[in-house]
Image (spheres, helix red, strand yellow):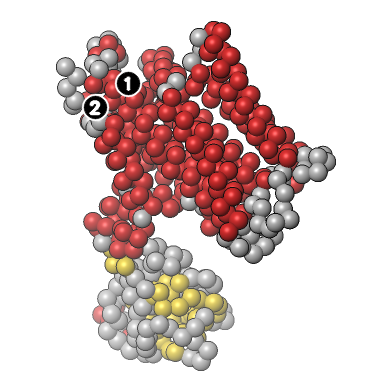
Amino acid sequence: MFGQLFAIARNTFVESIRQPVYFILLMVGGLAQVFNLLLSGFSMGFSEEKEVSGDDKLLLDMGLATVMVCATLLAAFIATNVLTREIENRTVLTVVSKPVGRPLFVIGKFFGVSAAMTMAVTIMLTFLMFALRHKVMSTARDVIDPVVVLCVSASVLGPIALGTWGNYFYGWVFSSTTTLAMLPATIIGYVCSLAVDKEWAIQPLTKEFKPQILVAAFCALMAVLVLSSVAIALSTRLGQVMTIVGCGAIFMLGLLSNYLFGRYAFSNQQIAIIKDVEWPDNEPTTLTSAGQTVIVALDSSPRETIRAGSSFYYGSDPSGLEQAVPEHPRFGGDAKNNADVRNPEMGKALVVRDMGTDHRVTLVNANGLEVKRPPVKGDYAFAKPTRRNVPARVAWSVIPNIQAFWLVDAITQGHKIPPRYVGLLAAYSGAQIVCFLSLAVFLFQRRDMG
C-alpha cells in the first residue's frame, strides 16, 4: 500500500511541476515582490525597533498576501490538472482498474500536490525574504542594495539557464528542471545575502535574519496546504474553471469568516477587565464553597449596571467563549445574608455582594456553584452567560479560518508568536485537511468513471 501511495504521490508531484502554469505563477509571485518593494514606499510609516518597522510593515503585509493569492490559484490549477483532467480523459481508469483503492488514489494525489505546493510556496516566500532583506527605499537618499540584487539574479537566472540548456541538449522539461534547481538556489542565495551587508562587508547571519517572520511564513504554508485539500475535494466533481472559482470563494470566506460567522457564533459583551484580585485573610482561594468571597477590582466603570444580587461571570477570552463560571439562574435570596447564600433553596450562583469604591466588586459563591477556577488578573468580566448560535458556529468551524494563519499583525506590533499557538494551528490544519480529504474520498468513491 505504501509503495502504491508513494508511486501516485511521486507521479503527481512530477506532473504538477511540469505544468507551464506552475513556473509562470512562480515568476509572477517573484516579480510581484519587486513591485511590492516599490509600492510600499508610499506608506510613510514610522520606525520602531522590531523585526519590521516603518514602510517594511506594509511590504510584509502585501508580500505575504501576494504569496497566499498566487498559491491559492496554483493549488486550483494543479488539482484540476492532476485529477479533473484524468477523470475527463478516462486515464484514471488505468489506475483504479488495478488493485488500487480509490481512497488511496485521492490521498496520493493530495500528497503529490502538497509536495509541489510546498516547493512553490517556499520559493515565493524566499522571494519575500529577499525583499525584506533589501528593505523599502522610503527616501531619495536610499540606494538599491547590490548584494540582494546579485543574489536574486543568480538564484533566478542560474536555474533558468540550467533549464534552457537541459531542455535543448537533453530534452529535459524546462519548467520542472528550472523550479527544482531554483529551490536550493534561492535558499542559498538568501543565506548569502544575510552574510554580506550593503557595503559588501561580512556580517553575522543573525543580524538580518527574522525568525518571527519565518514562523509566520510557516503558518501561511499550513494555510496553503489546507486550501490544497479544498482544491482536491472540489476537483473530484468540478471542472477547472469551477474549481478555481470554488477555491477563490473558500479563500475569501476564510478571510471573512470571523466577521461573517465568528461574531455570531458566541454572543456576549464584556463589561470590564479585572485588574486585581483580593482574597480574605485565612480563607481558601478556590471560590468553590458556599459563602466564599473574593474582591475583584475592575479597570473601569462597568459598561452595564450591576447591583447586589446580580450574577457575575468571567473568563480569559474577550468574546466570552471560555467562561469560568457556568450558566446559572438568578439568585433568589439576599446576597448580603449569609443564611441565604448557604440555603440550597435559593439556588446556586456567583453573585455580587457589594459594589465598593474604585470599581471594586465583592463576589460571593451562593450554595457552592461549581466554578471552574477563581478569577485572576486580566480576566474579562461579563454580566451574563455567553449565548451560542449553533448554525453560525458550525459554519465558522467548517470553513477554514484563514485569519488564524495570518500572523502579520503580531509581527508588526512586536508580539512574539508562542510555540503553543503554532502547535494548535498545526492541529487545526490537520483536522481541516482530514475533513476535506474525507469529503474528496466520499465524492470520488461515488463518481462514475465510465
Residue 276 x/y as whole percent: 55, 77
Mark identifier at residue 105: 1
Query: Which residue is label 2 attached to?
Result: 444
Residue 290 visible here: no
Secondary structure beneath dot 2 equals helix
Nearest to the observer: residue 386 or residue 90: 90
What crowding class fits label 2: few (fewer than 14 Cα within 10 Å), some (14-19), or many (20 or more)?
A: many
Q: Answer with the quarter of the image where residue 186 lies.
A: top right
**What amino acid is at disc 1?**
Phe
Q: Position of residue 138 (x, y in %)?
A: 65, 57
Horizontal placement of 265 versus 449: left or right? right
Q: Quadrant of residue 83?
A: top left
Horizontally, is 160 left or right of 426 in the view?
A: right
> Residue 331 vs residue 25: left or right?
left
Q: Quadrant of the C terminus?
A: top left
Residue at left 36%, top 41%?
A: 432
Q: Which mark is residue 361?
A: none
Q: How many marks?
A: 2
Residue 66 location (% of width, % of height): 48, 45
User: At numbered mark 1, what does the secondary structure look like: helix, strand or loop?
Assistant: helix
Mark found first going from the N terminus, 1 or 2:
1
Vertical side of 296 occupied by 211: above or below: above
Residue 7 x, y percent position in the rendering: 41, 15
The Cα atoms of the two marked residues, 1 and 2, are separated by: 10 Å
Q: Quadrant of the N terminus?
A: top left
Q: Is residue 263 visible?
A: yes
